[in-house]
C-alpha cells in the first residue's frame, strides 16, 4: 500500500491555512425582520394608481341599483390587477376594499380598523364624488413576517 509522506513544512502550511478565517464568505440572514430599506409599501404610487383607476372606471357613470355591484367589482378588480402588475413588493400582501353608495342626502359612515405593525404596514383611502354616487377605495398593505 502506498503511504503518503508529509514533511514538516507541508503540515505547517495546512495547519496555518485552516486556522485562518475565510475572508470571502458572505453570511446572509435567512429571516427578514422587516421590509428592506426603500422596499416599504409605496403609498404615493398606490394613491396615484387608485386615483387613475377610479377616474377611468367611474367618470360619466350614473348610479343605478342594477349596475352598482358591477361597478364596485370593476373598480376592485382594476385596482387589484394594477397592484399585482406594478406594485410587487417582496412579502407584502394587499387587501382592496371598495364601497359605492348613492348620494341621496342621507348620511354614511365608513370606518375600518386593523391591528398591525406601524413600521412596515400601511394603507391608503381615497374617495371620488361622481355626482349621483360616491365611491371609496381603501388599499391595505401588510408585511408578511
Image (tube, rainbow, N blue to C red):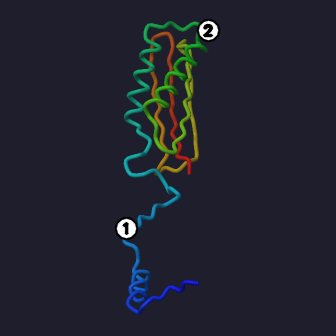
What number is the disc on residue 82? none
Q: Nearer the viewer, residue 71 or 6?
A: 6
Image coords of residue 130 (percent x, y): 45, 13
Nearer to us: label 2 or label 1: 1
What number is the disc on residue 24? 1
Rate crowding at label 1 as few (under 14), some (14 to 19) or many (20 or more) other CA atoms within 10 Å. Answer: few
Q: Nearer the viewer, residue 74 or 27?
A: 27
- From what the image shows, is residue 53 above or below residue 142? above
Image quadrant in which you'd find residue 63: top right
Q: Nearer the viewer, residue 5 or 33?
A: 5
Image coords of residue 61 (percent x, y): 48, 8
Label 2 SS:
loop
Q: Nearer the viewer, residue 113 or 45?
A: 45
Rate crowding at label 2 as few (under 14), some (14 to 19) or many (20 or more) other CA atoms within 10 Å. Answer: few
- From what the image shows, is residue 48 above or below residue 119? above
> Which corner quadrant holds the N terminus?
bottom right
Q: Are marks 2 and 1 in contact (CB under 8 Å)?
A: no
Residue 23 is left or right of residue 97, and the answer is: left
Q: Residue at x 48, y 44 (%)?
A: 90
Q: Residue at x 54, y 36 (%)?
A: 94
How many numbered marks are there? 2
Q: Residue at x 55, y 19 (%)?
A: 100
Residue 25 is left or right of residue 70, and the answer is: left
Image coords of residue 95 (percent x, y): 56, 34
Image coords of residue 112 (percent x, y): 57, 36
- From what the image shows, is residue 14 above or below residue 58? below
Image quadrant in which you'd find residue 97: top right
Instruction: Kindly identify which residue carries mark 2.
Output: 65
Question: In the orientation shown, which residue stands out farthest toward the front?
Answer: 1
Amino acid at each position: 500500500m502506498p503511504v503518503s509522506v508529509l514533511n514538516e513544512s507541508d503540515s505547517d502550511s495546512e495547519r496555518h491555512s485552516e486556522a485562518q478565517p475565510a475572508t470571502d464568505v458572505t453570511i446572509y440572514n435567512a429571516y427578514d425582520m422587516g421590509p428592506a430599506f426603500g422596499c416599504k409599501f409605496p403609498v404615493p404610487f398606490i394613491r396615484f394608481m387608485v386615483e387613475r383607476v377610479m377616474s377611468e372606471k367611474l367618470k360619466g357613470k350614473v348610479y343605478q341599483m342594477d349596475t352598482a355591484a358591477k361597478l364596485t367589482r370593476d373598480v376592485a378588480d382594476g385596482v387589484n390587477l394594477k397592484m399585482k402588475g406594478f406594485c410587487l413588493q417582496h412579502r407584502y400582501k394587499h387587501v382592496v376594499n371598495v364601497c359605492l353608495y348613492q348620494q341621496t342626502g342621507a348620511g354614511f359612515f365608513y370606518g375600518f380598523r386593523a391591528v398591525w405593525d406601524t413600521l412596515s404596514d400601511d394603507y391608503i383611502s381615497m374617495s371620488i364624488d361622481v355626482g349621483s354616487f360616491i365611491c371609496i377605495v381603501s388599499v391595505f398593505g401588510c408585511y408578511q413576517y
